Image (cartoon, grey):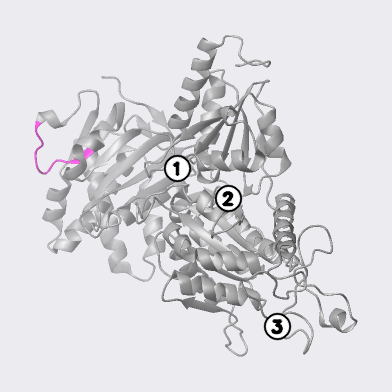
Amino acid sequence: MKRLESINDFVIKFANVNGSGSASANELFAKAVMRMGVPVSPRNIFPSNIQGMPTWYEARVCEKGYHGRRGGVDMMVAMNPQTWDADIAEIEPGGYLFYDSTRPMPPNKFREDVQTIAIPLTEIANATYTDPRQRQLFKNIIYVGALSALLDVDADVFETLFAEQYKGKERLLDSNIQALHLGRDYVKQHLQYPLGLRVRRSDKVGDQIFTDGNSAAALGCLFGGATVAAWYPITPSSSIPEAFQKYCDKYRIDDGTGRHNYAIVQAEDELASIGMVVGAGWNGARAFTATSGPGVSLMTEFIGLAYFAEIPVTIINVQRGGPSTGMPTRTQQADLLSCAYASHGDTKHVMLMPQDPHECFTHSAAALDLADRLQTPIFVMTDLDIGMNQRLCKPFVWDEGKAFDTGKVMTAAELEAGKDFGRYKDVDGDGIPWRTLPGTHPSKGAFFTRGTTRNPYAQYSERGPDYIYNMERLNRKFKTAADLVPQPILRNAAQNTPFGVIYFGSTSPAMREALDVLEEEGIHLDAMRLQAFPFPESVNRFIAEHERVFVAEQNRDGQMRYLLINELDVDPARLVRVLHYDGTPITARFIANAIRKNVEAVAQSVPAFGSKEMV
């Protein structure tokens, strides 16, 4: 059997039981690899139910810096008998199976093409500790210690991490270091090490930071000027307002008076939370809510009101598996249509689509500016994969001299001078009217609104021409937004090609690797990463320049493809679906295989396909 051999490039997956305390130990392993200077991208796959259900933690170690899931597992740390068969099946031929050998397993439970690493973890823990909870918790540290020796990770890296975590708690520090060395010593005394998979010190992490998208979005809201947050708990978005609270407690309390310069409300439900945010936006505060798909479903009536009354609102949607309750702790990109056209009647909403925690920070801050500028709801469409998993990304940078874009707000002086004010009148040709804030002027301005039709001067009207004027103006404003939102990112192939690919959000890290793999095989694609909806004209040009464009997304129905067809009126035959929706993050292998098969099928059926070179 030829074993896998690789330095700083492998996938290790931990199969555990929820509630066993394994998550912190697995995260410790990932952080230690990062401290060795090697990029690592971990993903926690956990159940929505209580203790006792299966859970997995997958860590991608990749010196090249690929942050997406690759597909396949090079080493499985199998700690859950319930999922043993499925876990073993994931291991690549020549890979490694690490397991607790305290209880013997029958021979038919192993694979001949996988190298087994048997360590009696439970026996070691039971011989060392008497307390049942300690035995469980320290068993996790023992296997991390064993892995550190097997993969050639320096012990001092872990000891430093322990010292940082348990500063001032020497008893906990000493016991964790003891457990670490129990695992290391067993390997040194009983096994051949290191394995074919190894971690070698490098300098590829650089100045990148290690954080999750939800924390980054909360910080973006803080720097973007949000002062009001209203929310109702829902997985996987709840940590956004919780992080916002933490940041506000640090940065938004007046040192002299102790006054809290913010308001955070946990409402009784999603309806109440979005209502509070709409009210705050109408009063001139920068306000946001964080939710997921089921929450958006409940919020649609207020979202329609904010759209029609033209009130700034920011909604951070951390998407999860649906419909209905769906898969609360799994990831998808399946709320595109429900958010793009949220509410009844003719509505269109701006959506920003970050690819990593860095863009969760920048896009959340930008959303608050856009909400004020456009006087409309803005969605930040992140998802569980980005939101709840820690990821290496560029450091956050903020220009302290940046002024917030508050948009068209008429002042008291302008009102007093008699400047024409029509709350819903388009005076600049961009579809965006002027607004006033409550208290601006004692007798002039507009301080009340409702969701019924009106004329340009906000007077109630059911006249058809007034309604059409307003609806066409709103559509004109939406087109204006196409030039204000973050623009698509283009990656040109090494040579001319009739093939293109469109992707967005959390699909991006896996797509980057898939494009490199395909290019090495001679399959070239121009690529466009969308950052926002509405689509600027460059998206239409990109599709027109290619005879076949793949649209990669993580949902069943090809929702982004539908938006492209519906909004740009393109020929559906030009857009090829690449769909992944089992709740796990899309992999580079999945993308590459789907595109490869399609390109090969085209080449066989139409040898002279395209006016450009195919590959």
Quadrant in which the N terminus appears: top left
Badge number at residue 555: 1
Instruction: Find residue 566 and report its image quarter.
Output: top right
Task: Name the mark nearer the viewer: 2 or 1.
Answer: 1
Q: Secondary structure at mark 1?
A: loop
Please say whether residue 101 is one of the residues in the magenta stretch: yes
Q: Main secondary structure of the magenta part?
A: loop
The disc at residue 353 is 2
User: If you read the primary sequence from the N terminus, does the residue marked by circle 2 or circle 1 appear first?
Assistant: 2
Magenta span:
98-106
Please, what is the three-letter code of the amino acid marked with disc 2? Answer: Met
Q: Residues within 10 Å of mark 2 (few under 14, many from 20)?
A: many
Q: Quick one: SS at disc 2? A: loop
Q: Which residue is mark 3?
A: 438
Q: Residue at x 88, y 76 (%)?
A: 419
Q: Position of residue 546 (x, y in %)?
A: 65, 26
